[in-house]
Amino acid sequence: MNSELKKAVDEVTAGYTVDNKTLIDGADLFVQMMKEGLALSKPQRLTMPMIPTFVTAVPLGKEKGLYLAGDLGGTNFRVCSVQLNGDHTFNLEQQKTKIPQDLMTGAQGLPLFRYLAEKIGLFIKEHHQNYCTEENDNRLKLGLTFSFPVDQTALHQGSLIRWTKGFDLPDVVGRDVVGLLQIQLDELTVPVDVVALANDTVGTLLLRAYSNDESKTKANTVVGCIFGTGTNGAYYESRENIKKINVESKGMAINTEWGSFDNGLKVLPNTKYDQIVDAETANPGYHLFEKRISGMFLGELLRVTLKDLADRELLFCDLKKERGGSLPHRLVSPWQLDSQVLLYLEIDDSTNLKMSQLILENELRLKTTPEERIAIQEITRAISKRAALLSSIPISAIVKHVKHLYKHDDNDFEIGCDGLVVEFFPGFKERIYEGIKIINPLLDLKKKIVLTIAKDGLGVGAALCASVA
Ligand code: GLC
């Protein structure tokens, strides 16, 4: 690498470095923000929402029956039916469709809910035809996983606080999303009642708790979390700590909405690239933790970093000359670099980073020199390393906050995780463990924190919510 480029790459990667103090202070601040959020009835920008979910018990694995689940959380809508067998196992049928881009943003939210209802109707016709005959007036119960911040007022009721992850349909904000879906189902005479509303993290928590046979794993499931398009976590909180509502049961699952941890940027690193990405989003100033961590933003962070180096004439100079002064459209336009590309760039160990060369040409129409690819790989690794280390903050903080509730046994603390980033990014989980070791939330307790991948949490978790409704 020429010395000027090397110097710039070193500066950029240093900016993406997280030191131990950030992690340790971050975990303390997280616990403080949990407590503040649990006391505050109206979420504010600088606090974490800490939303009561009205899910008052964690499943034991004995639940039975057929339930439906719908899952809206990123770019796809998934409908599933789940047969709970009552022995920690289940059978699942599912169908997934990509949501048309024009339904994700715009003045009207109704077409989106119409689309969801149509997909549910089609699924039932295909997989549960017996519910569609005139003689059968039984209705199916559906749990809706809706992975956006919702101010939940009952298990089956909640109004949208704001959209995240690229959705922007302003007329839905403040309205009950279950009601909006039920109206469309009824209009289409689909025999389904939406009986529960759950965030994806709650689904993940419930699924792991249902599947976890403690006698075998010697672990209690304490957190359900997502590191995918967005990031967030849910855990079970005891009644006396939930100051903002009156809880009649022993406790309740709380959806932290940790994407909004430290919107005040007291401890989080804040490079100029973070600021550019935040300014490009529909919710600037919000979900700043998520914007450093999750799949939707990692690609964009890399893109704006590369564009900056190109603007400073440190990268892609030959290419620019060749193209008469312009750079490929996909490098200069926001949101064109899919985070999956980072995955390939990160693991590439081919000679001259040939695999990266192909990926960059295919995905971004970006021709690169071997030297440029080394620079790109170093930056990619710095961005994903930062994301993984920062991810250890909420996990450590929640375990620190709840560990006293699990004094009665020697079981480990299990964290059920779902999402593309944690599942497929090389070394992501290991780096979370590295961060947990630095924060050391268990001090000298002889227990461990174990991250378990909880696949299909969304569907089964929502079905479990429907089963208790
Ligand atoms: C975003 C949403 C949150 C969801 C998370 C993971 O942070 O606000 O509700 O759980 O993405 O999908």
Image (cartoon, helix red, strand yellow):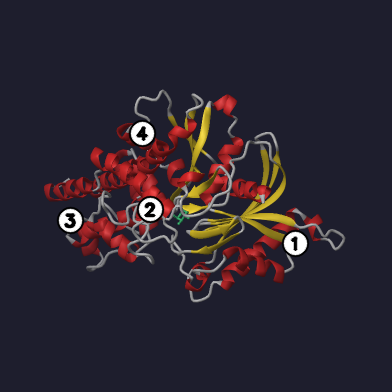
Name which quarter of the figure residue 136 lies in.
bottom right
Is tag 1's residue or tag 2's residue first in the polypeptide sequence? 1
- Mark 2 near ligand 1 (CB under 8 Å)? yes
Q: Residues within 10 Å of mark 2 (few under 14, many from 20)?
A: many
Residue to which mark 4 is pinned: 441
Query: Given the image, on which type of amino acid does mark 4 rest?
Result: Pro
Is tag 1's residue or tag 3's residue first in the polypeptide sequence? 1
Decide: is 466 above or below 404: below
- Residue 19 can be seen in this image: no
- Residue 347 can be seen in this image: yes
Residue 430 locus on image (x, y percent): 38, 34
Residue depicted at 44% across the width and 63% down the height: 166
Query: Given the image, on which type of amino acid does mark 1 rest?
Result: Pro
Q: Residues within 10 Å of mark 4 (few under 14, many from 20)?
A: many
Pointers 4 and 3 in contact (CB under 8 A)? Answer: no
Camera-nearest residue between 145 and 151: 151
Residue to which mark 1 is pinned: 191
Residue to which mark 2 is pinned: 290
Residue 436 locus on image (x, y percent): 35, 35
Q: Residue furthest bottom?
A: 107
Q: CA distance from mark 4 to mark 2?
A: 22 Å
Decide: is 1 above or below 365: above
Q: CA distance from mark 1 to mark 2?
A: 37 Å
Q: Secondary structure at mark 3?
A: loop
Q: Nearer the viewer, mark 4 or mark 3?
A: 4
Is tag 4's residue or tag 1's residue first in the polypeptide sequence? 1
Residue to which mark 3 is pinned: 314
Q: Nearer the viewer, mark 3 or mark 2?
A: 2
